[in-house]
Amino acid sequence: MGYLDHISDLCSETRIRKSKRKNMETVEIKVKMDCDGCERRVKNAASSLSGVRSVDVNRKQSRVTVKGYVEPKKVLKKVQSTGKKAEMWPYVPYTLTSYPYAPQAYDKKAPSGYVKNVPQAFHSMNSPTERFDAIFSDENPNACLIM
C-alpha cells in the first residue's frame, strides 16, 4: 500500500504557478499639450505600450490617464520620449485635504477642485498644536479633568 499512497499523493498535488503578471494600474501624468497634434502624439505613445487598456487625454487639465497592466515609470518614460515635459500627477482633490490653503499646497496652475499633494495639507498628529487641539476639543470626554 505504501507505493499506491505515494502515487496518489503525487497525482493529487497541485502546483501553484507564480504569475508574473502586473497589477491593474491607473497612472495619471501631467503633460503640457498645446494642440491636437501634441495630444495625438502623447496618446499614441501611451497606447503603444503593452498591457495598456485605455488612454484618456484631457488637454484642458494637461492630464493623461492610462489604465492597464503597466508600470508607472515605464508609462512616464514613454510619454517623455515624445519630447513633451511630463511628470506624475502632482495634485489631489480639494476635498481629501485637511488644510487646502496650507503653504505650498495651493497652486494657481492646478485645475479647479485640486491642490498640490504636499504633507502640510494633510492632518498630522505629530505637530504640537494638533495634539493640543485634540486634547482640548469637545469630543474629548476628559477635557474637564485636564483643566
Image (cartoon, helix red, strand yellow):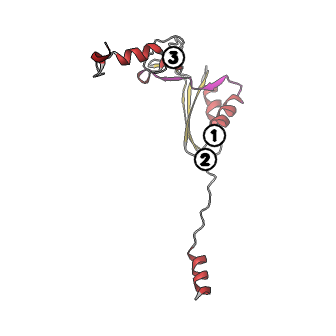
Marks 2 and 1, how far apart at CA: 8 Å
Check disc 2 and give the amino acid type. Lys
Marks 1 and 3, how far apart at CA: 28 Å
Q: Quadrant of the N terminus?
A: bottom right
- Structural crowding at the residue carrying mark 2, measured as other residues with C-alpha within 10 Å and reported as few (<14), some (14–19) or many (≥20): few
Seen at 55% across and 40% down, the residue is 25
Q: Which mark is residue 120?
A: 3
Residue position marked by numbered label 2 in the rendering: 22
Q: Locate residue 65, reporting x and y percent.
A: 55, 33
Q: Secondary structure at mark 1?
A: loop
Seen at 61% across and 42% down, the residue is 70
| Quarter occupied by residue 75 | top right
Q: Locate residue 44, reporting x and y percent.
A: 64, 35
Contact, mark 2 vs mark 1 (Cβ under 8 Å): yes
Based on the picture, tell me whether residue 84 belongs to the magenta stretch.
Answer: yes
Q: Quadrant of the C terminus?
A: top left
Given residues 20 and 62, the one toward you in this image is: 20
Q: Locate residue 105, reporting x and y percent.
A: 51, 15
Q: Give the mark toward the camera: 1 or 3.
A: 3
Q: Locate residue 88, reporting x and y percent.
A: 60, 27
Given residues 38 and 105, the one toward you in this image is: 105
Based on the picture, tell me whether residue 101 belongs to the magenta stretch.
Answer: no
Given residues 114 and 99, the one toward you in this image is: 99
Relative to 2, does residue 10 appear above or below in the rendering? above
Contact, mark 1 vs mark 3 (Cβ under 8 Å): no
- What residue range appears in magenta? 81-94
Position of residue 38 in the picture relative to residue 138 (left or right): right
Give the mark nearest the N terminus, 3 or 2: 2
Relative to 147, does residue 38 appear above or below in the rendering? below
